Image (cartoon, coloured by chain):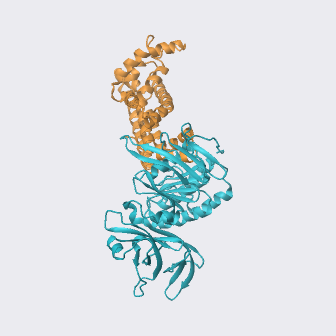
Amino acid sequence: MTANTRATHSIIEPNLPNTLQVNFTLTSSQQITYLDIDTRIPAKGVTAIYGHSGSGKTSLLRCIAGLEKAPNGSLAIHKDDWQATWQDSNIFLPVHKRPIGYVFQEASLFAHLNAEKNLRYAIKRADKKVTQEFYQRVIAVMGINDILERYPNQLSGGERQRIAIARALLIQPRLLLMDEPLAALDHQRKQEILPYLEKLQQSFDIPILYVSHSMDEVARLADHIVVLDQGKVIAEGKLTDVFSRIDLPQRLEDESGVILTGKVVEKDSQWNLMRIAFADHSIWIPDSGETLEQTVRTRILAKDVSLSLTQHEDTSIVNRLPVKVVAINADTDNAMALVRLKMGGEFLVAKMTQKSVYHLNLSQGTIVWAQVKSVALVR
Amino acid sequence: MILSEADIGAIGLTLRLATTVTILLLIIGTPIAWWLARTQSWLKGPVAAVVALPLVLPPTVLGFYLLIAMGPSGFIGEFTQSLGLGTLPFTFGGLVFASVIYSMPFVVQPLHNAMVAIGNRPLEVAATLRAGPIDRFFSVVLPLAKPGFITASILGFAHTVGEFGVILMIGGNIPDETRVVSVQVYDHVESLEYAQAHSLSALLVIFSFFVLLALYASQRKSSLAIGGGMPR
């Protein structure tokens, strides 16, 4: 694919680098709009397209791939060193001419070819010649060297998906689209394949759009997130910014919480704990074998954070942090409220009853102690 | 087993006819089946119905209309005459043409079913792997529809061997030109040569049995290997 520098009216200036300029409206035969999107999606690192089922996330991905044709839509990609328009009022680049890789939700290997020949199918048609070195690297990262001889019906679901990902990589795309690649797998297989996905993003410098309805996967893999609800973008930005927001629709409230990246700085072998330091604070969590200085990503759910006005010593909760209330959302139609807290340069979100907000007399600027009951180490 | 020279001639002619027809049908039937499997056009129903007509029509009715169409004043006859080929009835070419029409559903339907069974997904996958439409057809559709092609070939061949009515209507009974095995059996019976009728008939029974045996064996094997995709 040569760089396409043609300027079209549908591209809004300025063209930010490393973004995907997306404008799609999809209407069903009953005239119900189920996709109405006009936004920029980061085309760098891993961007999660997150939403519940029916939110339009798969439709959006299919529109980007060209598998779905949104009338009057437009799509352009701007990278540092190249840009291209894939769809506007004059152009609709067919799927096979877009420099993308696509991993489908369920196993999508060709049944008549064994694993290796599935890979060869991509190598033969790749955008640039696949070097032996690149091939070996893909095989190694996806850990598929021992299963290349097998046919798809002789592979487990996880193995098939690893071959499918390798096949998408070998086409050497400029953008990798993944449509819930783990959704068809059971919990154990998911855990088995997640490390490969992590290695994938560390080993290959390809922007990835990752569609998922699983917050666990998103928290673990993504840098950016676009949240879809009923076909519309309701939030987008850096992962931790979006999930520390307290104004998301109620159906996303269960996922409210923050994702914090920190470093292992201390180990307590007596109690089997390790201390994770963030920008200004640190917390103790069970030692799960990480090494000192290792960077980890943690997730603290709003429902696992409670507040008290004084620093209790007589509590079972280990992590107590001084924080400042910056916003309260008691706007929901049930008994609960979300409170956004500033902890140095980072944020926490706490979920409690509206009654508690009233009794503690919380308001913007109140200094309180946050008690963090549980921290999930997502990576 | 007593086979006269005429019997052997009839067997040779039958095999030549069935082979020619099967090859032609695979060439003609594949695009028709693919179009039927993919199209959303309103023409899909009418075309499918026309292709399936020989399944329900008595062979004599089909043969009658083909005879008229291929005759000197029929539209096919006028076309072949304008090409300087004369008219088709009572020639091997005429038999081939009629048999192609008559056996069409037996080839198109298994191909169609096999192609529908492939579904959209493998084609989408191939498109995301840079395969254009023609590449997709040859690299994905043909190999995945292979069981359908095997079934279609066997059925098309066997059905042409078993033809009688249409051939009698438009082919007549010319040795080494239009006298196929089924007509030869009829001739033997007409002339009360029961022993010879027996020999040829037994041969056809045995042949048919093994053809069908091969068909079911291939279906079992392919349904084990690829998992379905078999015609009705």
User: In the rendered view of the protein, which quadrant contains the N terminus of chain B?
Assistant: top left
Q: Quadrant of residue A250?
A: bottom left
Question: B34 or A365, which lies in front?
Answer: A365
Q: Can residue B218 be seen in the rendering of this structure?
A: yes
User: In the rendered view of the protein, which quadrant contains the C terminus of chain B?
Assistant: top left
Identify the residue at horizontal 39%, vertical 64% (top origin): A253
Question: B188 or A96, which lies in front?
Answer: A96
For the colour cyan, the matching chain is A
Question: B176 or B227, which lies in front?
Answer: B227
Task: Please tell me how many numbered marks the rendered image carries.
Answer: 0
**In the image as oriented, which residue stretches furthest toward the bottom?**
A270
Above or below B177: residue A154: below
Residue A209: x and y in percent read: 53, 55
Residue B154: x and y in percent read: 45, 37
Residue A167: x and y in percent read: 57, 54
**In the image as oriented, which residue stretches furthest toward the top?**
B73
Question: B7 or B33, which lies in front?
Answer: B33
Q: Can residue A379 be seen in the rendering of this structure?
A: no
Residue A102: x and y in percent read: 53, 52
- Colour used to depict chain B in the structure image: orange
Above or below B24: residue A2: below
